[in-house]
Image (cartoon, helix red, strand yellow):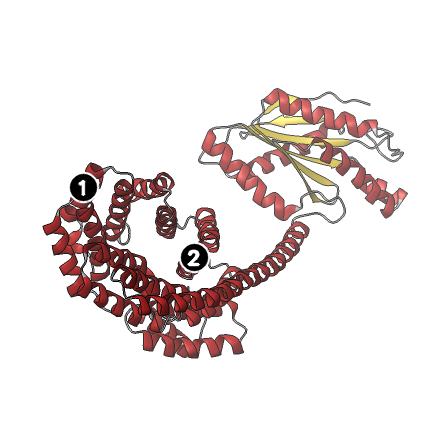
Amino acid sequence: MDYSGYNGKVRTWMIEVEKNRGVNAGLVLKYCEEIEKYAVENDDIRLLGLVCFYMGETYYLLNDGEKLFHYITRAITYLDESEQWKQLAEAYNIMAITSLNRGNAPIAMDYYLTGLNYCKKYGITHQENIINLNVGTLYLMNGQENEAQKYFEKVKFYVERNPQIEDYANLMTCIYANLGRCYLQKGMVDKAQECVEQIDKSYWDSLHKAEKLYVLCFKTRFYYSIGKTALCEECVEQIHMQMDADMAIMDIFDDFYDFGELLLDMDKDDVFWDTVTILEKMIKSSRIINLQRKIVSLKIKWYRKNCQDDKYLRATGLYYELTEIMERENRYMIANMLGVRSSLEHANEKRKEAEAANEQLQKKSETDPLTNLANRFRLNDYSAEAFEHALEKGGKLAVEILDIDYFKEYNDNYGHQAGDECILAIAGELRKMQSQGVFCARYGGDEFIVIYEGMTEEEVFDRAGKLRQNIMALNMEHAYSKAAKIVTVSQGICFDIPREENKNWDFLHVADTMLYQVKRQSRNNIVMGNLQQKVIKKGASVV
């Protein structure tokens, strides 16, 4: 976003926010609060969208689920209204992850797909890859390995061909780890092994702590599945040494939960309870009931396995209570999603109304008020476009200028209202001939312009002749004309193939020269010339 239009304070605040994102949460929130006050006071929707997004993103990293939800849902409305599509797609991705961690996969999928629609519509490739990975993971979690693999392969196809993109190593690691999980769940051990080897060989050394833990969780499950106990034990030890509560819970929880279940199978009680303790610390500030419930479910499995009946019963009671709270929370989430949808629909209606109003204004600014044909402003744009297109393709172009014979005498004797009706009648015939390759405009007064694209010399001359005959067929009386006793027109045309040394208005200049020849020799006629001002075709006077 360009901050040059803001005062020095706002620019400083925004620079500090962007500099400290993901680095210093306290500073980000401090400056965001100042920006939010300014944006509210000045009703700055664009700034509000950004600041709410940054605050939601920061609370995501701080594992504060409630504040994250509050700010990201606000951000979605503002970002959509101010058309900040990249941040909007990221916001939908965060909302999907949050919904999934709250235990509502259908709502998560809805948010993911909405985010993907924005990515595809506005070409937000990086975020599209992230969301596709997350959608694939959602399918994988629900046992749909084949569908999951399609999403992972789609991202892999793009990322491999663009090694310069942001976070290339992390993306490739995530792709191979997820594909490895797919293969493992499908019993394709050799393919899963290839994924492990590819990560170790190409990407491991460039990974950060969180990414390494994610890979280690996958490798632990892989080595346990194929019976490589020593390697499995080694991965468990590495995870045990590195895991702590200072991580974004929603990025890593499912992997640690799966790791906890694996520790139960392996009878690693000490590491299991250390993992549970760290998970409890991580979710303490998140206040996400589903995550609390899943930790309780881990405890229940351990108590049942070790026959600790009293603790098992207490834990199952707590699990039931959390389930009731979660049902209420899910109703809130659904209501919140419907509220967001309602706000977006309202914003879209306002946008459509504004677009319709702008379109109407644009149409008015480019339309002649009397005839509803294009005016000179639209003619300027269209003639330049037609010229450039013909120049690029080596195509034929013709420009015709026509005016009504002895129109001043018509106006003086029949009156201005009759003059307007005469112009309207001519415009009506011009509108009839407008189609693909033919453009008509009112040039001013009783003069009109017709542009023919991609037609032969004969086709242009025939169309111009038919227009002339149709105008005569209107049989409008003009007793004061020296050309005929009805309204007629004179037409000058320039037909040629434009070259680099030409300008689009050269065609109009030659057409005007040809029109002058018609008027000098015999009105109610057509003369066609080329860019060298040589007459190449001439009509016969018809009375």
Query: Quick check: 54 above or below 435?
Result: below
Query: Quick check: 118 above or below 15?
Result: above
Q: Position of residue 432 (x, y in %)?
A: 73, 32
Q: Which mark is residue 96?
A: 2
Q: Position of residue 219 (x, y in %)?
A: 19, 50
Is residue 19 visible in the rendered structure shown here? Answer: no
Q: Is 334 left or right of 354, judged from the image as shown?
A: left
Callout 2 secondary element: helix
Q: Which mark is residue 409?
A: none
Q: Position of residue 355 (x, y in %)?
A: 61, 54
Is residue 203 visible in the rendered structure shown here? Answer: yes
Q: Is 470 left or right of 132, judged from the image as shown?
A: right
Q: Residues within 10 Å of mark 2 (few under 14, many from 20)?
A: many
Mark 1 lies on residue: 193
Query: Quick check: 185 above or below 88?
Result: above
Mark 1 residue type = Gln
Q: Is 270 left or right of 148, judged from the image as shown?
A: left
Name the residue: 28% across, 70% down. Answer: 23
Callout 1 secondary element: helix
Quadrant into which the C terminus falls: top right
Q: Is 254 left or right of 481, judged from the image as shown?
A: left
Q: Earlier in the sequence, mark 2 or mark 1?
A: 2
Label 2, label 1: how many angstroms apart (C-alpha)?
Answer: 31 Å
Name the residue: 43% across, 57% down. Answer: 96
- Residue depth check, mark 2 versus mark 1: number of the one nearer the observer: 1
